[in-house]
Amino acid sequence: MGEMGFNAGGGVINWFPGHMAAATRAIRQRLKVADFVIEVRDARIPLSSANADLQPQLSGKRRVIALNKKDLANPNIMHRWTHYFDTCKQDCVPISAHSKGSVKKLLDLVEYKLKEVISREPTLLVMVVGVPNVGKSALINSIHQIALSRFPAQEKMKRATVGPLPGVTQDIAGYKIAHQPSIYVLDTPGVLVPSIPDIETGLKLALAGSVKDSVVGEERIAQYLLAVLNTRGTPFHWKHLNNRRMEGIRYESEEKNEYNLKNLKPKRMNPPNKSDVVYIEDLVMEVQRALYLSLTEFNGNIEDEGDLEGLIDQQFGALQKALKIPHKASEARLMVSKKFLTLFRTGKLGPFILDDVPHVEHRS
Ligand code: GDP
């Protein structure tokens, strides 16, 4: 699928600004003093959201991989991923950073893993790392809340310095999550540079929001998403959704990302209320119906690149209608792409996992 005309030029994409290389060096230094690493990845792309350069150093550390945003990932496939990491002898916990319950489970595992081996160290440091937008800040925020409930006295020493580091000028601060030994989670995450060995990985990272849309372009990302949906036959599952109104769509009031559902509404309208929720539900149904119909009526070969591209072109037109984008809008395709991507990114098209589980040899 990465073929579909996306591969022009080929090779590794060099897109990140120079300061990120300096940031990587700084993280290497900080990693040295961390006793434990929580590597946050996006549950929708458990492999593509890893940083390749730091893997040797990370896997040499005590580490757990937190597969965050599990609420956006297909639960039926998630267990295959946890099984995969099990087989690789790598601890891994699917979490949702906004849910205290799942973050507590993660912290319990961290504590268990640290106490298992180190009981005499007076202070242990846990560092949270991950590529952009995987939810590191959201996770640290939840950890902070949990830390406060476990050790209320912390309120006064929120930004206490837990130790100066060689090679790092600023003091570090952490939230205490356990006693004897004292375990602190550093309050500043380590931002890793995404690795983009090929265009398909770049597209997946863009879909998950870890690389900016402008790096690959919204239209291309939307085109890729349509290719994935069509080849997996996902729209066929939307046949029965057509007449059902989905209940319980809620808005998160303080969403800071740019994929807010509010962006689907024309600008002049007020913040979402009950009727807006209905409006979005209808929009989702229209989109699903449009994709279902176009795929059912398609009589080409989905495996054929040209046929698939033809189908996708036609779907852009169908989506434009479904998303109520005026016919003459000069940048209609771009607008279609942006709105369609927002629906996907907010989970409205359903949970998804984009990476494929690698095949692991089993000895019988
Ligand atoms: P960071 O760049 O890794 O620090 O990522 P942020 O913590 O800023 O999160 C990026 C976006 O993802 C924000 O809009 C968060 O609200 C959202 N987010 C974080 N964790 C979750 C999660 O578990 N589920 C969902 N649906 N969104 C999340």
Image (cartoon, rainbow, N blue to C red):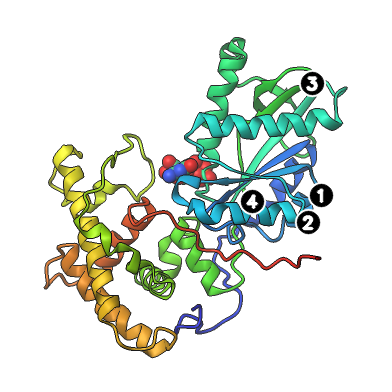
Are circles 3 and 2 on residues that touch, CB within 8 Å?
no
Mark 4: few/some/many CA within 10 Å (<14, 14-19, 20+): some
Are circles 3 and 1 on residues that touch, CB within 8 Å?
no
Mark 3: which amino acid?
Pro
Query: Could you tell me which residue is drawn at 47 percent across and 54 percent down?
Result: 74
Mark 3: few/some/many CA within 10 Å (<14, 14-19, 20+): some
Q: Considering only order in the chain, which callout, 2 or 3, is on the residue closer to the N terminus?
A: 2
Q: Considering only order in the chain, which callout, 1 or 3, is on the residue closer to the N terminus?
A: 1
**Marks 2 and 4, Cα distance to the nearest angstrom?**
21 Å
Q: Considering only order in the chain, which callout, 4 or 2, is on the residue closer to the N terminus?
A: 2
Q: Which residue is mark 4?
A: 82
**Marking on residue 56:** 2
Q: Position of residue 192 (x, y in %)?
A: 62, 52
Q: Nearer the viewer, mark 2 or mark 4?
A: 4
Query: Could you tell me which residue is drawn at 43 percent across and 71 percent down?
Result: 232
Mark 1: which amino acid?
Gly
Q: Which residue is mark 1?
A: 60
Are circles 2 and 4 on residues that touch, CB within 8 Å?
no
Mark 2: which amino acid?
Pro
Q: Position of residue 257 (x, y in %)?
A: 39, 46
Figure check: 296 above or below 77: below
Q: Position of residue 43 (x, y in %)?
A: 54, 52
Mark 4: which amino acid?
Thr
Note whether ligand 1 is within 8 Å of mark 4: no
Mark 2: few/some/many CA within 10 Å (<14, 14-19, 20+): few
Viewer-side residue, 352 vs 136: 352
| Res 252 quadrant in image | top left
Q: Nearer the viewer, mark 3 or mark 4?
A: 4
**Marks 3 and 1, Cα distance to the nearest angstrom?**
22 Å
Note whether ligand 1 is within 8 Å of mark 2: no
Are circles 1 and 2 on residues that touch, CB within 8 Å?
yes
Q: Which residue is mark 3?
A: 181
